[in-house]
């Protein structure tokens, strides 16, 4: 079925296509969740869901914030890739409410840990079911990889909740680390689909290449790094695999790059995001050799890599799929800059002035969430209204 032939549903502009509710929810989470975390750090006696503010922060930024944006992207892109409809209208609203319920459940009085876990665990399988027609029943077998990733993510989330309920905070933290690698893997896979394409369209002189053998090598290296880092944290073997993974992904990025991308912020930020992930892999190797703090390495991957990709992709998709010109104004340039500066402050600030580590956390977090506030201010009216050309989506 050709989705472009579907009639627009004027009653539900917010639920016309997956990017609309989930990018808005993702941007809201990108601002509110770090703000709550900074409040917890400033108020040690404040109540924290799961009984552990640090693990709540880890869980929500990955299983809440990151998965919302991934959901919005795939609910939109897979429709274009396959020509098959994805959830919209009431079904899309149900998915959005289910995601929101998972965020709110731990805060509701009287909610047991098991009930809170079950509500949160329901979202990823429901999302996968909604995407099966577009990702599985097509001639593009590579799209099925995302369904496998969703299955592993759901399992990882289950391990996180089970460990937390049993009081095993170490296992919960390991599950959170595993999810970070799954998110990074998803982003590198999506990047391979869209960044060369976007680069070629925006910079006619470019000739980006994406050799299958290099894609497979980079994927295998990243999967290997994640598995070893989760199972054998701190082992010297991590350094070898991390440097190999960084080399493979650097080679990949170099084949996509053209100097012209830096004249187009909406494209340059996606290249920057991939660069942050490569930096994160290098720092992971250094941390295994005890040459760099692990906590800062994690934020290079999460704030720099995930944050830069998420805000760049949300802007690109939101403009493109609402029929608007792919041009960034000052507010979006400010959002891109705030995420970059926040990531730099959080990752490298504590190295410059270790005694002021908490101040760097606050500065980095404030800048990063400020970027998502700017996105929300600029795009809320767009995401909640119909396309100006009257087309579907």
Image: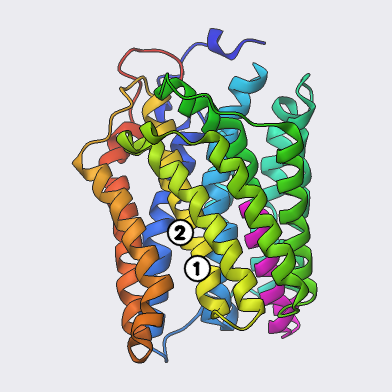
Spot occupied by residue 377 in the image (x, y as percentages of width and height): 26, 46
Please tell me how crowded label 1 is: few (under 14), some (14-19), or many (20+) other residues with Cα within 10 Å. many
Q: Residue at x 50, y 80 (%)?
A: 48
Q: Is residue 52 above or below residue 194?
A: below
Q: Quadrant of the N terminus?
A: top right
Instruction: Decide which of 164, 203 is in the foreground and name it.
Output: 203
Q: Which residue is mark 1?
A: 299
Residue 94 seen: no
353 with respect to 17 (left or right): left
Spot occupied by residue 312 in the image (x, y as percentages of width and height): 41, 42
Residue lying at the far top in this picture: please name it: 5
Mark 1–mark 2 CB contact (< 8 Å): yes
Residue 134 seen: yes
Spot occupied by residue 137 in the image (x, y as percentages of width and height): 79, 23
Specify start and end residues of the magenta stretch as a single range: 163-184
Instruction: Decide which of 176, 189 is in the foreground and name it.
Output: 189
Total labels: the figure holds 2
- Res. 182 image quadrant: bottom right
Q: Which residue is mark 2?
A: 304
Q: Residue at x 78, y 19 (%)?
A: 139
Q: Residue at x 47, y 49 (%)?
A: 273
Q: Residue at x 43, y 65 (%)?
A: 33
Spot occupied by residue 217 in the image (x, y as percentages of width and height): 76, 45
Instruction: Decide which of 390, 74 is in the foreground and name it.
Output: 74
- Res. 351 image quadrant: bottom left
């Amino acid at each position: 079925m050709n989705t472009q032939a579907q009639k627009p549903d004027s009653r539900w502009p917010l639920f016309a296509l997956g990017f609309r509710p989930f990018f808005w929810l993702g941007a809201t989470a990108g601002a509110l969740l770090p703000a709550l975390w900074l409040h917890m750090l400033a108020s040690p006696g404040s109540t924290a869901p799961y009984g552990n503010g640090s693990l709540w922060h880890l869980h929500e930024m990955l299983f809440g914030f990151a998965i919302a944006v991934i959901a919005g992207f795939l609910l939109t892109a897979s429709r274009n890739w396959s020509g098959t409809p994805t959830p919209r209208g009431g079904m899309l609203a149900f998915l959005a409410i289910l995601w929101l319920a998972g965020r709110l459940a731990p805060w509701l009085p009287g909610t047991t840990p098991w009930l809170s876990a079950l509500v949160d665990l329901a979202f990823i399988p429901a999302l996968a079911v909604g995407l099966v027609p577009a990702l599985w029943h097509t001639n593009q077998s590579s799209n099925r990889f995302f369904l496998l990733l969703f299955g592993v993510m759901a399992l990882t989330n289950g391990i996180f909740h089970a460990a937390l309920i049993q009081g095993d905070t170490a296992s919960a933290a390991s599950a959170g680390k595993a999810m970070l690698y799954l998110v990074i893997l998803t982003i590198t896979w999506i990047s391979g689909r869209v960044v060369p394409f976007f680069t070629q369209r925006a910079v006619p002189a470019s000739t980006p290449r994406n050799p299958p053998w290099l894609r497979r090598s980079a994927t295998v290296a990243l999967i290997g790094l994640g598995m070893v880092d989760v199972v054998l944290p701190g082992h010297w073997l991590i350094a070898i695999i991390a440097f190999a993974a960084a080399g493979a992904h650097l080679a990949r990025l170099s084949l996509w790059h053209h100097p012209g991308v830096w004249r187009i912020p909406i494209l340059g930020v996606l290249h920057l995001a991939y660069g942050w992930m490569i930096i994160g892999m290098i720092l992971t190797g250094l941390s295994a050799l005890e040459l760099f703090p692990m906590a800062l390495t994690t934020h290079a991957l999460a704030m720099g890599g995930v944050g830069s990709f998420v805000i760049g992709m949300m802007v690109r998709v939101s403009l493109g799929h609402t029929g608007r010109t792919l041009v960034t104004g000052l507010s979006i340039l400010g959002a891109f800059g705030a995420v970059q500066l926040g990531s730099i402050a959080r990752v490298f600030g504590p190295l410059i002035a270790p005694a002021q580590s908490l101040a760097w956390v606050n500065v980095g977090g404030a800048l990063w969430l400020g970027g998502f506030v700017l996105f929300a201010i600029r795009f809320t009216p767009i995401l909640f209204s119909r396309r100006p050309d009257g087309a579907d989506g």
